[in-house]
Image: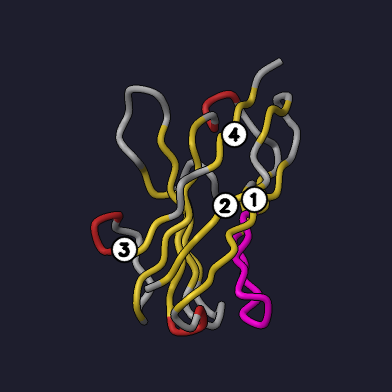
Amino acid sequence: QVQLAESGGGLVQPGGSLRLSCAASGRTFSNCAMGWFRQAPGKEREFVAAISRYGGTTYYADSVKGRFTISRDNAKNTGYLQMNSLKPEDTGIYFCAARRVAVSTRREEYDYWGQGTQVTVSS
């Protein structure tokens, strides 16, 4: 089992930045790939970014490429999502997720999920 807890969400103006954190406990974090997903009101949960076990491979949704950066620190059992140049359409609940071994962009392939953190981009 892996327990995940997100933090760092909040209200930010368009063009601003936020850094989300995902603290992991339980099963060895470095054995798991990690992903970030988000869900806006009335919409399905969508892929945002993913990173392989040791950080060598990353993937991003087209909508966030060049603005968001996913990273991880296995020594601290923590993953991160740096979000810059935020737009109102980035508003939603952001979830971190983990899966054994291989990185994936597919929501249904993730085994463990956090409770989410709210990000609101508004003036």
The magenta stretch is 70-81
- What is the secondary structure assignment of the residue under circle 3? loop
Label for residue 6?
A: 2
Reply above or below: 80 against 57: above
Position of residue 113 measured from the top left corner of the image (x, y, whole percent): 39, 56
Asked if marks 4 and 1 touch (Cβ < 8 Å), the reply is: yes
Of the two numbered discs 1 and 2 on the same chain, state the one appearing first in sequence.
2
Label 2 neighbourhood size at 10 Å, few (<14), some (14-19), many (20+)? many
Mark 4, residue position: 119
| Kind of residue sitting beneath label 1 | Leu
Image quarter in which the C terminus is found: top right
Mark 1, residue position: 20
Q: What residue appears at the point 54 percent right and 32 percent down from the top-left corner?
A: 90
Asked if marks 1 and 2 touch (Cβ < 8 Å), the reply is: yes
Q: CA distance from mark 2 to mark 4?
A: 11 Å
Q: Which is more foreground, mark 1 or mark 2? A: 2
